Image: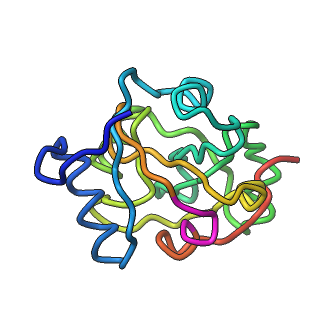
């Protein structure tokens, strides 16, 4: 894992770094040797629990894209989450919808650095970890954060995302 000079970041990761800096977050974007498109791959590369990986998933609800930051340890129960959140049904966004909503590709979606803020939920399971890792705009870049900081950064609600 390599710490990247901000000027050497890929464009998408530079946008994430700029958004983090604007929010007052002091963290370093790190580049992984291998792609971390899955929580298991990211956890192996970072030598951490898979539950400490904060996956940024985009769904569509009520005709708009929404962001769900979930622990890598489990899957989102869309029915349970939509009820808790008070939204219409959630369905996975297509790769094209993800890119349009975030400017980023599936496998590297960050919680920030999007063209506009998305309604968001942060999985309460992430609070069990003092440090969580989130993608930084590409499948090869990540940054360390906390569940509380994800809530602040995204303006999201802390909710359980499983049944």
**Going by the image, does 23 lie left or right of 5?**
right
**Going by the image, does 39 lie left or right of 28?**
right
Residue 162 appears at what percent x and percent y? Answer: 82, 47
**Going by the image, does 62 lie left or right of 86?**
left
Q: Residue furthest top?
A: 34
Residue 147: within the magenta? yes
> Residue at the spot x=54%, y=47% of the render?
59
Residue 27 appears at what percent x and percent y? Answer: 39, 62
Residue 145 appears at what percent x and percent y? Answer: 52, 60
> Residue at the spot x=34%, y=50% of the render?
29
The magenta-colored residue range is 145-150
Q: Quadrant of residue 19?
A: bottom left
Q: Quadrant of residue 72?
A: top right
> Residue at the spot x=55%, y=71% of the render?
149
Residue 37: within the magenta? no
Residue 50 appears at what percent x and percent y? Answer: 68, 35
Q: Give the answer, above or below, for where 26 lies relative to 29.
A: below
**Main secondary-structure element of the magenta-colored stretch:** helix
């Amino acid at each position: 894992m390599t710490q990247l000079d901000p000027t050497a970041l890929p464009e998408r990761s530079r946008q994430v770094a700029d958004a983090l800096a604007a929010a007052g977050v002091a963290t370093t974007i790190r580049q992984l040797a291998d792609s971390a498109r899955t929580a298991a791959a990211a956890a192996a590369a970072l030598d951490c629990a898979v539950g400490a990986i904060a996956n940024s998933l985009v769904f569509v609800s009520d005709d708009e894209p929404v962001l769900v930051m979930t622990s890598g340890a489990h899957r989102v129960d869309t029915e349970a989450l939509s009820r808790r959140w008070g939204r219409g049904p959630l369905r996975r966004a297509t790769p094209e919808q993800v890119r349009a909503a975030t400017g980023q590709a599936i496998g590297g979606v960050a919680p920030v650095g999007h063209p506009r803020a998305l309604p968001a939920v942060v999985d309460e399971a992430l609070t069990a970890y003092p440090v969580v890792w989130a993608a930084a705009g590409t499948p090869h870049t990540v940054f360390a954060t906390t569940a509380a900081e994800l809530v602040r950064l995204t303006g999201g609600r802390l909710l359980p995302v499983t049944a």
